């Protein structure tokens, strides 16, 4: 590994782990059929329907992919503090695994929201590190 990227090994591993999580969620979201569909073909909102919960877990993960990847890559490229970048990227992925698990396995919306907020805070922190690092160059 290049000497510049070596301190960011956890962040790079988090990006790889995120790709795997997205593929797993894609597979799970396609498994089975919804009880009811809207005219557009999407499942009707019904958290008691496991198919709907799997579909929402995947779509929810898609929504945050761009910000997470952009913030992580930008933080690495500007040379932001490796410890903090690695910490926030790793906690983000852990929180998103927990979010997806809560989304798929339960109907507990407050628990899912807590994990979602943790991931959001990590994304914001990564963004802040990237912006601060860009102006410190």
Image: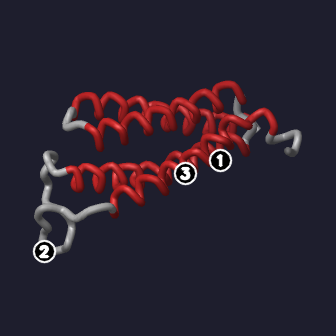
Q: Do the CB atoms of the residues marked 2 and 1 lie less than 8 Å apart?
A: no
Nearest the viewer among 76 and 22 is 22
Q: Residue at x 65, y 47 (%)?
A: 73
Query: In the rendered image of this protein, does residue 35 appear above or below residue 123?
Result: below
Instruction: In the displayed orientation, state which residue is furthest to the front.
Output: 32
- Percent from the top left, x then y, of residue 99? 36, 37
Which residue, given by chain and number where applicable, does mark 3 sit on? Answer: 20
- Percent from the top left, x then y, of residue 34? 18, 62
Element carrying mark 2: loop
Please name which of the two marks, 2 or 3, marks the residue nearer to the observer: 3
- What is the tally of numbered marks visible in this picture? 3
Circle 3 Cα neighbour tier, 10 Å, few/some/many (<14 / 14–19 / ≥20): few
Element carrying mark 1: helix
Labelled disc at residue 19: none
Which residue, given by chain and number where applicable, does mark 2 sit on? Answer: 39
- N-term mark: 2 or 3: 3
Which residue, given by chain and number where applicable, does mark 1 sit on? Answer: 73
**Which quadrant holds residue 13?**
top right
Q: Residue at x 41, y 29 (%)?
A: 118
**Which quadrant holds residue 26?**
bottom left
Circle 2 Cα neighbour tier, 10 Å, few/some/many (<14 / 14–19 / ≥20): few
Marks 1 and 3, how far apart at CA = 17 Å
- N-term mark: 1 or 3: 3
Marks 2 and 1, how far apart at CA = 39 Å
Please name which of the two marks, 1 or 3, marks the residue nearer to the observer: 3
Element carrying mark 3: helix
Marks 2 and 3, how far apart at CA = 31 Å
- Percent from the top left, x then y, of residue 14? 61, 41
Instruction: In the displayed orientation, state which residue is furthest to the right.
Output: 3
């Amino acid at each position: 590994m290049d000497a510049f990227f070596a301190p960011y090994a956890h962040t790079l591993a988090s990006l790889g782990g995120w790709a795997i999580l997205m593929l797993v969620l894609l597979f799970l979201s396609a498994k089975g059929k919804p009880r009811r569909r809207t005219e557009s073909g999407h499942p009707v909102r019904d958290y008691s329907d496991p198919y709907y919960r799997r579909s929402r877990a995947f779509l929810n993960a898609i929504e945050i992919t761009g910000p997470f990847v952009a913030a992580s890559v930008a933080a690495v490229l500007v040379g932001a503090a490796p410890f903090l970048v690695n910490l926030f990227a790793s906690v983000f992925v852990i929180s998103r695994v927990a979010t997806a698990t809560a989304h798929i396995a339960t109907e507990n919306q407050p628990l899912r929201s807590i994990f979602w907020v943790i991931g959001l805070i990590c994304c914001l922190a990564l963004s802040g590190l990237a912006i601060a690092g860009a102006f410190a160059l």
